[in-house]
Image (cartoon, helix red, strand yellow):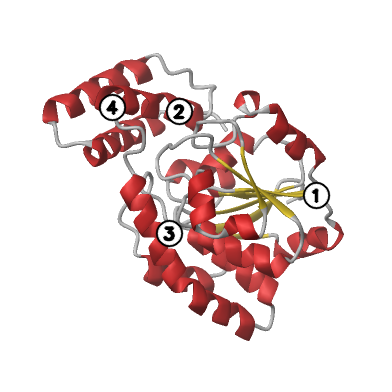
């Protein structure tokens, strides 16, 4: 997916939010915004938004000296999600279709996003995601693909939603490789975050080798690319992974909630809609 002009104010908004999370120094924060402003002035619109996001957060790290501005918020989001874990297991166990419910919960977890949606209400939004029908719903294709899948690659997104991913992985009951970011960027999950959520007990947790808020294949490690090429089922969480992989002709299922009108328009849905989309579907 390319970058649109509407993405530029979002880059500045995210830079401001990250810089303020890192420190309380108006001069340093202004320096972040100045440098990001110069960065986006040279922005190639044919690049994906996470490629620019990678550079934005590099600037934030360099100016503030803080490697992970959202470390505390990530830990808190994981703890809040873990507190919901027993009730999520109960919801799945009581469901007529546990797999579908677990998929919807995984989508619901994508609400935890300090970059695009810092004002989310976790419990309220999870209930809404379970009640509301996805705007694109390729669940049946997912169910059929899962039955014969032997190599499953699960692309994680935000740290807090790793707990929701854990519920789905438990229900799938198949070997899974779970990929996370190489280093902290926004509130995306790293290996440490996945371990804190207990995913290392269910899946092989690996780094993509990429430090962007998405999977930029030409920046990923060879070990990760081996998993990517071998996988006969790929689960891609969140907007960032969709932005970087949306042109790929691979067996990818995108699970996400749209949090900006640009991505909603690209998907042909409304802002705020939930999506279970198969990349190889005809519709």
Secondary element at image label 1:
loop
Q: 203 or 143, which lies in front?
A: 203
- What is the x, y in percent for residue 215? 59, 35
* Frontmost residue, 58 versus 108: 58
Question: Nearer the N terminus, badge 2 or badge 1?
Answer: 2
Q: Residue at x 66, y 53 (%)?
A: 277
Q: Which mark is residue 78?
A: 3
Q: Earlier in the sequence, mark 4 or mark 2?
A: 2
Horizontal and vertical percent position of residue 237: 58, 50
On the image, numbered disc 4 is attached to which residue? 65
Which of the two discs, 4 and 3, labels the residue nearer the N terminus? 4
As helix, strand or loop, the secondary structure at mark 4 comes to loop
Q: Which residue is at 49% across, 22% downward? A: 45
Q: Which residue is mark 2?
A: 54
Q: CA distance from mark 3 to mark 1?
A: 27 Å
When the figure is inspected, residue 217 is found, relative to residue 75, above or below; the finding is: above
Disc 2 crowd, CA 10 A, few/some/many (<14, 14-19, 20+): some
Q: In the image, which is nearer the foreground, mark 2 or mark 1?
A: 1
Q: N-terminal of the two: label 3 or label 2?
A: 2
Asked whether, in this view, residue 254 is left or right of residue 239, the answer is right
Residue 39 seen: yes
Q: Nearer the viewer, mark 1 or mark 4?
A: 4
Residue 111 placement (x, y as % from top left): 44, 57
List the residue tagged with mark 1: 151
Foreground pick, 105 / 8: 105
Give the residue displayed 54% in from the left and 22% down from the top: 46
Q: Is residue 135 above or below residue 250?
A: below
Say what secondary structure mark 3 lies in: helix
């Amino acid at each position: 997916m390319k970058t649109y002009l509407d993405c530029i104010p979002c880059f500045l908004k995210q830079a401001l939010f990250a810089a303020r999370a890192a420190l309380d120094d108006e001069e340093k924060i202004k320096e972040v915004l100045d440098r990001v402003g110069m960065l986006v002035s040279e922005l190639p619109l044919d690049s994906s938004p996470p490629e620019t996001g990678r550079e934005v957060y590099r600037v934030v790290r360099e100016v503030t000296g803080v490697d992970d501005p959202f470390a505390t918020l990530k830990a808190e989001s994981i703890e809040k999600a873990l507190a919901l874990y027993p009730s999520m297991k109960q919801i799945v166990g009581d469901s007529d279709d546990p797999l579908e419910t677990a998929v919807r919960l995984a989508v619901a977890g994508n609400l935890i996003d300090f970059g695009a949606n810092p004002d989310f209400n976790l419990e309220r939004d999870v209930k809404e995601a379970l009640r509301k029908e996805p705007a694109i719903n390729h669940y049946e294709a997912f169910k059929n693909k899962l039955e014969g899948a032997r190599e499953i690659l699960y692309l994680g997104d935000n740290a807090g939603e790793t707990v929701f991913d854990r519920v789905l992985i438990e229900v799938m009951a198949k070997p899974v490789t779970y990929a996370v970011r190489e280093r902290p960027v926004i509130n995306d999950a790293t290996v440490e975050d996945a371990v804190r959520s207990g995913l290392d007990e269910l899946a092989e947790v690996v780094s993509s080798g990429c430090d962007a808020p998405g999977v930029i294949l030409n920046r990923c490690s060879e070990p990760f690319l081996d998993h990517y090429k071998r996988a006969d089922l790929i689960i891609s969480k969140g907007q960032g992974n969709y932005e970087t992989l949306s042109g790929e002709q691979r067996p990818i299922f995108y699970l996400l909630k749209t949090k900006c009108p640009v991505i909603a328009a690209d998907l042909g849905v409304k802002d705020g809609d939930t999506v279970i989309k198969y990349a190889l579907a005809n519709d």
